[in-house]
Amino acid sequence: MAAVGLNGVKLATTSSQAYLESKAVKDTRALMAELCRHFYTLGWVTGTGGSITMKVHDDSIPKPQQLILMSPSAVQKERMEPEDMYVLSASGSVLSAPSPKPFPHKPPKCTDCDPLFRKAYELRDAAAVFHSHGLESCLVTMINPLSKEFRITHMEMIKGIKGHGYYDELVVPIIENTAYEYQLTESFAKAIEDYPKATAVLVRNHGVFVWGDSWISAKTQSECYHYLFDAAIKLHQMGLDWSTPNHGPIQSARRGLTLAGELNVSVKARKSNGEIDPFPQCIVLDIEGTTTPISFVSEVLFPYARDNVGRHLSLTYDTPETKADIKLLRSQVQSDLEQGISGAVPIPSDDAGKEEVIAALVANVDAMIKADRKITALKELQGHIWRTGYENNELEGIVFDDVPEALEKWHALGIKVYIYSSGSRLAQRLIFGKTNHGDLRKYLSGFFDTTVGNKRETRSYVEISESLGVDKPSDILFVTDVYQEATAAKAAGLEVIISIRPGNGPLPDNHGFKTIKSFSDI
């Protein structure tokens, strides 16, 4: 296919011999060979393991049509030359392959990571993808063999990961290894789709894939990921918990602590019949109606998002973040239209112009908010709008007065506390990062949103149990105000308590769950 330059003049086809010998292709070949030598010194591609791929950057060619270079399989990565790289078309056809070398070299073969690399290009619009066999990326997945995610927070190098800051929790999905790398394609693609903010996927007992919108971004993030994996391993060896904000001792507080104003507290409570009832290892909290008044969400957050969606989209329309939000909304609206959901209106193509697109988006978002839709596309956009509100001091999170004291107490006892809400992880961090009682994120170990599943589905709580790596689901206490959520969590084996707060809806008669009116009752 002929590419068209910015000036409208047709260029030589990217598959032509002239283009294959162009400076852009030669420079990319040389850069990849240089990076492989460097990655070898870091221990990422030793023993012929690991692989890298890059697109040939050319401003005159749209990124989806740019040529793809990939390293060969089963070769000494530190000894590779520029001419050893494979050149593929955007569709994956091999346009140029390296010449065979004499014994003891093996016949050339393109990397087995080819289908995974192309998934990253397709689903993330990446410009480069690096696959490392670095020891730290392997070992960090083995510490908890049941965990489906690697989570870490409050580490300076998190700032080197796209879209993350020091206070954010970095979440990297972990998929299970297979005998051959191409067999990872399906689970790799699912992880990318399930974690829209991720720029890496860990493969248990294997390594990591990292991508970026340029080779510099991919390299920088790869270095930061390996640093964080290594830090987690070392903290674990020291008996410290890398997943919590203060990186305190792992479970050490469970032996008994002296809290302010209290006597020595054991992490085991005695039931009325004299049996020992251990506190849960983890507590998972709902937000609306549990930690926070329903009125704050319905009367403050929702109206703010609804009133500011047009302005937000207009000001940020061309940013990667908003483009991703619009892509999610387009997909959701298309599904809504096919299902005949009330309030859904078609979103015109970009060719219709920015104003037309935004007007349709505003109409759909308004309908979604009025219907209180618990869908990722809406929640992601709302979180970004609310972030601006918090940054401009137009919003402040509200929690019930008993919440901060309970969070501090559980934290001191070594009980990990997580949030599970239909709001995005960003929205959750915003609420607890700036509340009427200050920043409470230091007491929280992580956040779950609808990317793990609908809150009224049992499978969602199974996913959370597997992610937290507890011995059994009953080691987790889930607190919510919604009966259907309580039922789903109970079916997954979690312990459940229903929160009764002012403004909450009524519960069914004989619902069968323990209820509380304050966290001090737990």
Image (cartoon, helix red, strand yellow):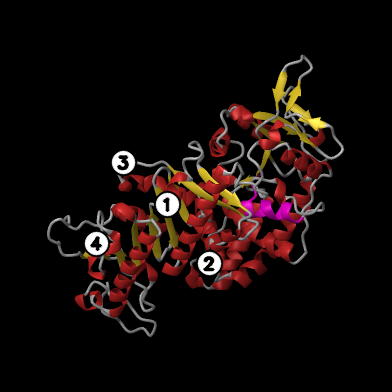
Looking at the image, do the residues carrying marks 3 and 4 touch, with CB atoms under 8 Å apart? Answer: no
**Residue type indicated by callout 1:** Val
- Image position of 469 with respect to 75: above or below: above
**Local secondary structure at mark 4:** loop
Residues packed near mark 4 inside 10 Å, few (<14), some (14 to 19) or many (20 plus)? few
**Residue type indicated by callout 4:** Ser
Q: What is the x, y in percent for residue 503?
A: 81, 41
Q: Nearer the viewer, mark 1 or mark 4?
A: 1
Q: Residue at x 47, y 66 (%)?
A: 217
* Residue carrying label 2: 320
* Residue carrying label 3: 179
Q: Nearer the viewer, mark 2 or mark 1?
A: 1
| Quadrant where the C terminus is found in the figure | top right
* Residue carrying label 1: 208
Give the extent of the magenta segment. Answer: 420-434
* Residue carrying label 4: 93
Give the Cα distance between marks 3 and 2. 36 Å
